[in-house]
Image: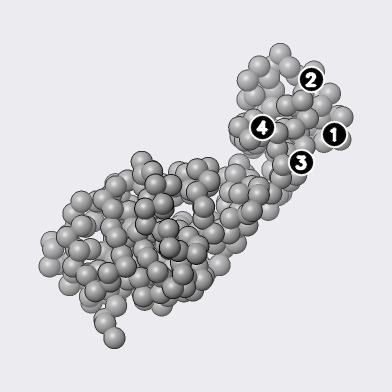
Amino acid sequence: MMKDIATPIRTKAILEKYGFSFKKSLGQNFLIEPNVLTRIVDHAEVTEETGVIEIGPGIGALTEQLARRAKKVVAFEIDQRLLPILNETLSPYPNVKVIHQDVLEADLKTAIEENFHDCKEIMVVANLPYYVTTPIIMKLLEEKIPLKGIVVMLQKEVADRIAASPSSKDYGSLSIAVQYYTEAKTVMTVPKTVFVPQPNVDSAIIRLLVREKPQVEVDNEDFFFQIVRASFAQRRKTLLNNLVHFLPNGKERKAFIEETLAEIKIDGRRRGETLSIEEFALLSNTLTK
């Protein structure tokens, strides 16, 4: 059995060999606990029929665990300095391909067509760089690429917001945006001590299983999300106040917004965080008409 990359001793040796220094701007925190990595792969239910997209492989610690179980792994790495390291650490795994590109600029549909045509399902599994967690998750969902699910490590605080329920302090537009497309569940909390360098916050692993169709039917998706963002624009304000101030032409349409809320029996004095995704869909569809 090969020695895992994700041990403190081997990680240190690899970094020293290549004289690698961490770039804070890229949010680089490498995992040095193999058990956490195997748990991530377990939660993603990766099998020999799975194609995996990884984002930010670092020195290949998670990539290696994925490669041992998946049919194929395609990893996007933005930091050119890591390419020679990955070339060496992943050399035993012919089923891994590293693409030197910012995943936010990548054409993922084409990458999937080129690499995963013989895979039964596609998962995204990653230890995400914290500073771009939300844009990456939203890109994966909004581009509607054919994913079975996403299992990622991120800041615990962001995981709490994604998985939150109505009327909780963490519930907001991010909760609704992600739950519209997926079933979200935080499956594990990860202490900061298993990373090098140690981040300032604890992390969590969240599992997002992509729904066959969105959780609610909306007539106009863009407008639905506009309503949601407006409703949470200022958390202390009432729903009516937020809609009037933050929807385009809201002030001119105040009477119409009030009438609509009355018609669908949603009290405008409530706060946005008390509305369920179904209520937001009802409001958006009625206003659209």
Find disc 4 in the rendering and name its residue: 220
Q: Which part of the image, by quadrant, shows the C terminus?
A: top right
Label 1 to label 3: alpha-carbon separation: 9 Å
Decide which of 130, 93 is in the foreground and name it: 93
Q: Give the mark toward the camera: 4 or 1.
A: 4
Where disc 3 sits, the SS reads helix
Relative vertical location of residue 134 with respect to residue 195 in this rendering, above or below = above
- Among the two numbered marks 2 and 3 on one chain, the one whose residue lies closer to the N terminus: 2
Relative vertical location of residue 238 with respect to residue 273 in this rendering, above or below = above
Decide which of 172, 286 is in the foreground and name it: 286
Q: Give the mark toward the camera: 4 or 2.
A: 4
Q: Which mark is residue 147?
A: none
**Amino acid identity at mark 2:** Phe
Task: Tell me what residue is drawn at x 73 percent, y 26 percent.
Answer: 288
Q: Are marks 4 and 2 in contact (CB under 8 Å)?
A: no
Where disc 2 sits, the SS reads helix
- Give the x, y percent position of residue 272: 70, 38
Q: Residues within 10 Å of mark 4 (few under 14, many from 20)?
A: few
Question: How many numbered marks are there?
Answer: 4
- Give the x, y percent position of residue 45: 51, 71
**Amino acid identity at mark 4:** Asn
- Among the two numbered marks 3 and 4 on one chain, the one whose residue lies closer to the N terminus: 4
Q: Which mark is residue 264?
A: 1
Q: Is residue 206 visible?
A: no
- Give the x, y percent position of residue 217: 72, 42
Q: Quadrant of residue 231?
A: top right
Task: Tell me what residue is drawn at x 36 percent, y 47 percent.
Answer: 103
Find disc 3 in the rendering and name its residue: 279
Find disc 2 in the rendering and name its residue: 256
